[in-house]
Image (cartoon, rainbow, N blue to C red):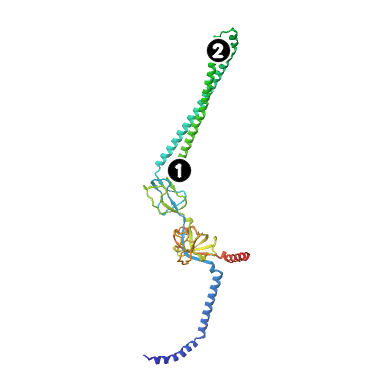
Amino acid sequence: MGTPDTEEAGRPNDEPAATSARRSLSPRVKLFLLCVGAVVLVAVLAWYIRHRTYGQYFEETNDAQLQADAVVIAPRVSGYVSQLLVTDNQDVVAGQPLLRIEGRDYSAQVAQARAQIAEAQAGADNARAGVSEQRAAIAQAEAELAAARSKAAHDAGEVARYAPLAASGAETRQQLAQLRLAASQSAEQVRQLTAALEGQRRRIPAIEAQIRQAEAQAQGGQAQLSSANVNLAATVIKAPVAGRVGNKTVMPGQFVQAGTRLMSLVPLQRLYVVANFKETQLALMRPGQPARISVDALSGTELDGQVVSVSPGTGAQFSLLPPENATGNFTKIVQRVPVRIAVLASPAARKLLVPGLSVTVTVDTRGAKGDLEHIEDEQKRLEARDR
């Protein structure tokens, strides 16, 4: 082991050796290094040009998931489940029966409503018959009144004829008194028959009111019948859309309440992606732009997509407790905005996709690359006009 003086003394002798080693590189090695450097420089230049003209317009995020607007299946009526017609994860078509609820109670309601309608219609028919009878009674009363008026006119004429004769002594006053009594009775009979006819006529509106009441009861019964039929039809729950059964929580024989979740129906043909892009990635993102969707569950298989819409607010704004930045402690955090993207996949690919799968989304924003310059020009024109 040498001393420090010996090591220091050896260093000046090593420098000429290193220098000579560098100088000893062959021309072939120098040419190789020069070519490598040139290739690296060209590659960096090509990457830069491609990034400026192409790559910078592709926005990517892996904060994205497949989603679908699942339909919650819930009964309109309460009752015991008599039949369960589907199983977990079964594909169904729109209108296919999913389960049946015991419907005897609702059938009884239908029968009761029909009986009420029949009773009301019978009451209306009875009242109409009463109107017909009353019109006949009025016609009879009018005939009797006409006869009484004729008799009263005859008796009044007899009194007028006998009065001069009795005054001259040609007829007795007793006869005249009898005629006057008969005329008075005839006039009274006319008044009684007139009042009776008026009473008969006034019964017509009352009977017609009974008809309207019976018809209203029939209409009420018809409404009850319609409601009962709706409830009876609701005992068979059908699929509102085509999809796959999931989250099934009902069993045969179970009592279910109206509005209780029984299962979910996931329309797999209507899958879409919700991609949460950073706010710094949205400047050129517009609806209608093409996208590429890489699905992790399919080993990165890429599917076509299209931007449908951009959320009107960040994810934080729609949370249960939105952040309140007007406080003493504030830290700026890059926000993310949900972007809805339609999935343009083949039927074979859709069979393998389910909501909740993680995906990576890349959006091509080249279609809007001139928008920022246009916005800046418009802003400058507005500022110039304000001056």
Q: Residues within 10 Å of mark 1 (few under 14, many from 20)?
A: some
Give the CA distance from mark 1 to mark 2: 77 Å
Where is 38 relative to 86, above or below? below
Residue 230 rendering spot, x and y as whole percentages = 45, 43
Q: Quadrant of the N terminus?
A: bottom left
Q: Quadrant of the C terminus?
A: bottom right
Left or right of 58? Residue 83 is left
Asked where in the image residue 383 lies, by quadrant, the reply is bottom right
Q: Which residue is mark 2?
A: 179
Q: Which residue is mark 1?
A: 230
Q: Residue furthest top?
A: 170
Residue at (54, 73) in percent of width and height: 48
Where is 109 relative to 57, above or below? above
Residue at (41, 52) in percent of width and height: 263
Please tell me the numbered disc located at residue 193: none
Amino acid type, label 1: Val
In the foreground, 81 or 187: 187
Amino acid type, label 2: Leu
Label 2 SS = helix
| Image depth: mark 1 or mark 2 in front | 2
Where is 48 relative to 92, above or below? below
Residue 51 rendering spot, x and y as whole percentages = 54, 70
Residue 19 rendering spot, x and y as whole percentages = 48, 88
Q: Residues within 10 Å of mark 2 (few under 14, many from 20)?
A: many
Sequence-first tag of 1 and 2: 2
Residue at (52, 77) in percent of width and height: 40
Q: Residue furthest front?
A: 167
Label 1 SS = helix
